Image (tube, rainbow, N blue to C red):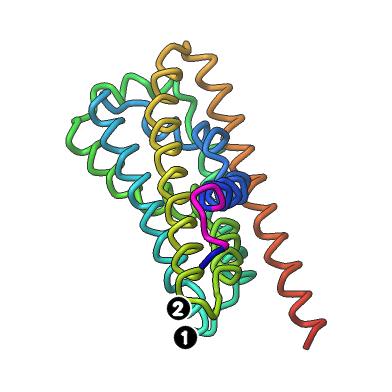
Amino acid sequence: MDSISLSSFYHYVFVCFVALFPPVNPLGTALIVGPFLKWESRRGRIQAAAAISIYCLSICLVTTMIGGLFFKLFGISIPVVQIAGGLLIARMGFSILTALDPSEDQEKVVESKGPVHGKSVKSMLFYPLAFPTTTGGGTISVLLALSANSYHTNPGIYLFNLLATSVACLIMAAVIFVCYSLTPTILDRLNSQALSVFNKLSGFLTFCVGIQIMVDGVLGVAKLLIKN
């Protein structure tokens, strides 16, 4: 208990946040999620960004608390989660790449009924935008590693580390909300040609991210097979 102090708490929160930043990548992922919120009203964008950030926070907290037990219960390994999540992300990126040019379809989108479009976006907030696009296999693996590091025979130190990890997840959720709520506003200022280029670029990046996650999962499975 003597080793627990406010400064060490801040330090561990910072370490956890830095560890979470690369797999979540809120700035880069915001450019992927942005086109999906492009046609929403300002209020709708804020609500969608808030919902995604809450979903991400829930995923992070649940993973931190009982993630390891859950996957052991169903016999699911992290590499398998990475392969499945990467496949879904790659599929989403491919759909963006093969979609119609926004400049050709813009009038249809604007003239479409708002409630119908709103429902379609709401149905995507948890899957695939929150999971696995924002918080996927990489994020889960980092949280499981942090949770493993939190295990300690001293209950006080264990709760200390667990609370610090949870605070880091809360800060990350706030960063996700800010990035996701502001990105669509930036996209609004782009003309149709720039938006088309941006959409294709984001689709390609999404596809590449998905493939990379799948490759990491395959390598993880290979390592498990070699160990066994």
Query: Is 12 in the magenta?
Result: no
Could you tell me which residue is drawn at 37 percent across and 44 percent down?
53
Residue type marked 2: Phe
Give the quadrant of residue 176: top left
Q: Label 2 crowding class (10 Å Cα cut-off): few <14, some 14-19, many 20+?
A: few
Q: How many marks?
A: 2
Q: Residue at x 47, y 80 (%)?
A: 69
- Residue 67 location in percent, x, y? 47, 72
The residue positioned 49% from the left and 25% from the top of the image is 101
Decide whether residue 4 is among the magenta residues.
yes
Q: Position of residue 167 (x, y in %)?
A: 43, 51
Mark 1 surroundings: few (<14), some (14-19) or many (≥20) residues within 10 A: few
| Magenta extent | 3-8
The image's mark for residue 73 is 1
- Which residue is label 2 attached to? 70
- Compared to residue 225, the image places residue 202 above or below, namely above
| Residue 165 image position (x, y, % from top left) | 49, 57
Q: Amino acid at mark 1?
A: Leu
Contact between labelled residues 2 and 1, with CB atoms less than 8 Å apart: yes
Report which quarter residue 215 is drawn in.
bottom right
SS at badge 2: helix
